[in-house]
């Protein structure tokens, strides 16, 4: 249990995935008109966000922050 | 000539009304312009994203620009981009923000980005209303 007795999401990856999902859906809907194009573009965006987040995370790992 | 002038004025009025409604209710501009799929998607996604920010103990930053804390003012403007949900959340007492919560910064990011994305949605609705898309 987390804050105020509520279940709390503490997984950074899960929160990054949720954030990426929301942003990908909005950008794909904004930038493409056909549902199929939106789905494909959204998937590519989501994959890109996740991959970039993981790669940047690993690159930052040695830094003493 | 009169008809031309009237034609020029009427779409401009609609444009502004659509922009205001698109800001106030995420997706409303697209719904009014007949883009139902896009409108419903924006309505659900942006509202959920803002709600997720509150659920993650994010803060709804107060309006009023304090020169000693310029980033708070900018965050408030971004939060306000979501429209009516900003005021509903404030009215219901949500968005106080818990700095000690582990998800506090995540919550802020979700709420701020939801507002910024809605600003993009408003610009898209504006372009559609102007006939550019």
Image (spheres, rainbow, N blue to C red):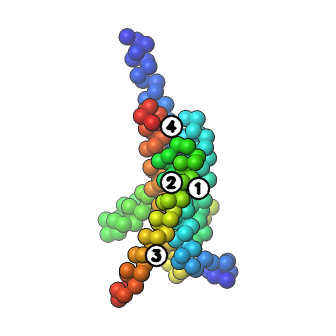
Front residue (pair B110, A45): A45
Q: Secondary structure at mark 4?
A: helix
Instruction: Please state, as top left, top right, bottom left or bottom right, where the N terminus of chain B lies in the image.
Output: top left
| Residue name at image x 57 percent, y 74 percent | A14
Residue B123: percent from the left, percent from the top?
Answer: 43, 44
* Disc assigned to residue A41: 2
Q: Are marks 4 and 1 on the same chain?
A: yes
Residue under label 1, please give it.
B45
On screen, B60 above or below A7? above
Is residue B62 at all visible to an observer of this figure? no
Residue under label 4, please give it.
B18
> In 3D space, how far apart are the residues under numbered discs 1 and 3 (Cα atoms)?
24 Å
Tell me if mark 1 has few (under 14), some (14-19) or many (20+) residues whose alpha carbon lies within 10 angstroms of its own. Answer: many
Q: Say if mark 2 contacts mark 3, CB within 8 Å.
A: no
Q: Chain of mark 4?
A: B
* Disc assigned to residue A54: 3
């Amino acid at each position: 249990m987390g804050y105020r007795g509520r279940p709390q999401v503490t997984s950074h990856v899960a929160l990054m995935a949720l954030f990426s999902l929301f942003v990908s859906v909005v950008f794909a809907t904004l930038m493409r008109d056909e549902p199929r194009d939106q789905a494909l573009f959204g998937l590519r965006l989501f994959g890109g966000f996740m991959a970039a987040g993981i790669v940047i995370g690993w690159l930052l790992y040695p830094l003493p922050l | 000539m009169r008809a031309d002038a009237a034609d020029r004025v009427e779409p401009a009025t609609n444009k502004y009304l659509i922009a205001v409604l698109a800001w106030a209710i995420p997706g409303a501009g697209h719904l009014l312009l007949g883009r139902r799929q896009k409108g419903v998607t924006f309505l659900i996604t942006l509202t959920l994203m803002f709600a997720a920010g509150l659920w993650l103990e994010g803060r709804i930053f107060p309006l009023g620009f304090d020169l000693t804390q310029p980033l708070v003012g900018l965050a408030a403007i971004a939060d306000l981009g979501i429209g009516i949900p900003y005021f509903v959340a404030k009215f219901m007492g949500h968005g106080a923000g818990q700095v000690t919560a582990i998800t506090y910064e995540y919550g802020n990011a979700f709420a701020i980005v939801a507002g910024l994305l809605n600003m993009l949605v408003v610009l898209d609705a504006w372009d559609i209303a102007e006939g550019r898309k």
